[in-house]
Amino acid sequence: MPVIKKLVKTAIDFVDVRLGIRDILADNLTKYLLPRNVNIWYTLGAVLMTLFGLQFATGILLLIYYVPNPSEAFGSVQAIMNEVPFGWLIRYLHAVGSNVIVIALLLHMLSVLFMGAYKRPRELTWLSGFLLFNLALGLCLTGYLLPWSQLSFWATTVATDAAGAIPVIGDEIVRFLRGGAMVGDSTLGRFFALHVMGLPLILALLIGFHLFCVRRVGISKPPFGPDYQPQPPSQVFRHQEHPGGIPFFPNYFVKDLAVISFFLALLAGVVFFAPNLFIPPSAYEPADPFVTPPHIKPEWYFLWAYQTLKIFPSEFLGLAVQGAFMTFLALLPFLDRGPERRPARRPLFVTCYILGILVFLAISIWGHYS
Amino acid sequence: MDNNPISPSQRRGFLITILAGLGTAVTAVTLWPMWRFLAPRKGPGALERVAVARASVDLGAAHFFNFRGAPAVLLQPSPGNFAAFSAVCPHLGCIIKWQQDKGEFLCPCHAGRFSADGKVLGGPPPKPLESIPVALEGDQIMVG
Ligand code: FES
């Protein structure tokens, strides 16, 4: 042990002399104070970073054996599952992990909404987070096609087809998305490029920006407890300090680790005991452009969109409603400008919030059984 | 208890030991599947024999084929006689060529020369070509 200790110290000394790393570490770990009443919902960012890291690592591993070519894609995924040692583990971690990420993203957004943390001066944090959410869904969508199964093929056909409801240019957009009239070779090519390079690159940059915002503005104080007071909006930039708060490291870091472990346990639980929870049987048949399997349905997190398209009399109307809702969500901090963040004092917001969740659940369940 | 208090440094040492143990276990559990996932796949069994159609090896000509993952060459020096060698030059690993007119192998990299039975005739190669046993089975030549 003393040897290791000495080695670590020597290494840190080396970097410290050159980059002043000890100051940076202290500023961001032990001297980085969080509000005393910071709660468990604030760990979701760290959870998401871990999960994205896991997707990144497993994704690179899968790339070693995956062949992005319609005639070999399905077979290469089968080989990963059945022949490559631990290939099943890597692939299930990647496929199930994407679902866990969507769950964590939704929880992260819901907690930020509930605590009003998106409000001024954190509009840019919210906006970049919202874009990250959409990018993650884009990664899910593009990744779904790659195994080239019946499920992949038809889910992508349905998803790209939805864009056809846009008047005038709709058909052209569908062709553009697919790279042709039908989902086929060229669709696989562009989805593959987006999934492994394009979207992850933007995602990484955006995560960097999001973290920068969080760190630069300072963590928002949870709007609970007797000493909470809404802050009047400031006209100049001000980093929100929390004097007398708890240090990020080790105090809050341990909580981060605990919740990360919980999510990893959840992921491992599904991977080992119910890997098919999110993977319907049509994922095990190779794509056949001439046979549409019955009951083609998108993943659970797209069910709401799928069902709204069916509820409205015209697809265009459904698409417009979805677009309007997403735009509203993106611009929420610019529309909701009051400084009050305590849920108990925002009855209208909380009512809409709860109703929104219920409507989302109801439409998704309806979509699942329809 | 009061007579035997646990000092903060003992407590810290204990925690660090536990954490180091856990960390090692987690690392091992992570690295082992990754190592196995990345390790090169065993091709056809290392002892597997390769069948080559007899008709593909002309008298005096050479037939190159894949033997256990590396290039090899079959010769028919005299009618009905076959010999097989690894086509990898024992000098620095280039692939040798058959020169039918001269009846010898030439390594293009550093001009190593080998006779039709694999012996070094000139150039830098330190040892003869590795020979591979062959057996005739009907119209197939079984190599290995
Ligand atoms: S590698 Fe063949 S002569 Fe050098």
Image (cartoon, rainbow, N blue to C red):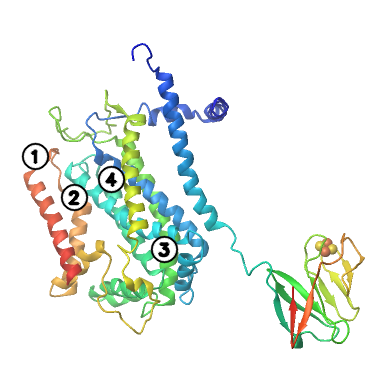
Which residue corresponds to mark 4? A124
Horizontal side of residue B1 vs B97, given as left or right:
left
Q: Do callouts 4 and 2 point to residues on the same chain?
A: yes
Q: Do callouts 4 and 3 point to residues on the same chain?
A: yes
Chain letter for mark 4, please.
Answer: A
Tag 4: amino acid: Leu
Image quadrant holding the C terminus of chain A, namely: bottom left
* Distance from the alpha carbon under mark 4 to that under mark 3: 25 Å
Displayed-image quarter of ligand 1: bottom right
Mark nearest the camera among 4 and 3 is 3
Chain letter for mark 2, please.
Answer: A
Is residue A156 visible in the rendered image? The answer is no
Which residue corresponds to mark 1? A344
User: Residue at the spot x=15%, y=46% of the render?
Assistant: A336
Q: Residues within 10 Å of mark 3 (few under 14, many from 20)?
A: some
Tag 3: amino acid: Leu
Q: Residue A235 location, x and y as percent?
A: 22, 34
* Distance from the alpha carbon under mark 1 to that under mark 4: 25 Å
Q: For numbered disc 2, what is the local secondary structure?
A: helix
Horizontal side of residue A178 vs A223, given as left or right:
right
Horizontal side of residue B115 vs A98, given as left or right:
right
Q: Residue B80 location, x and y as percent?
A: 84, 86
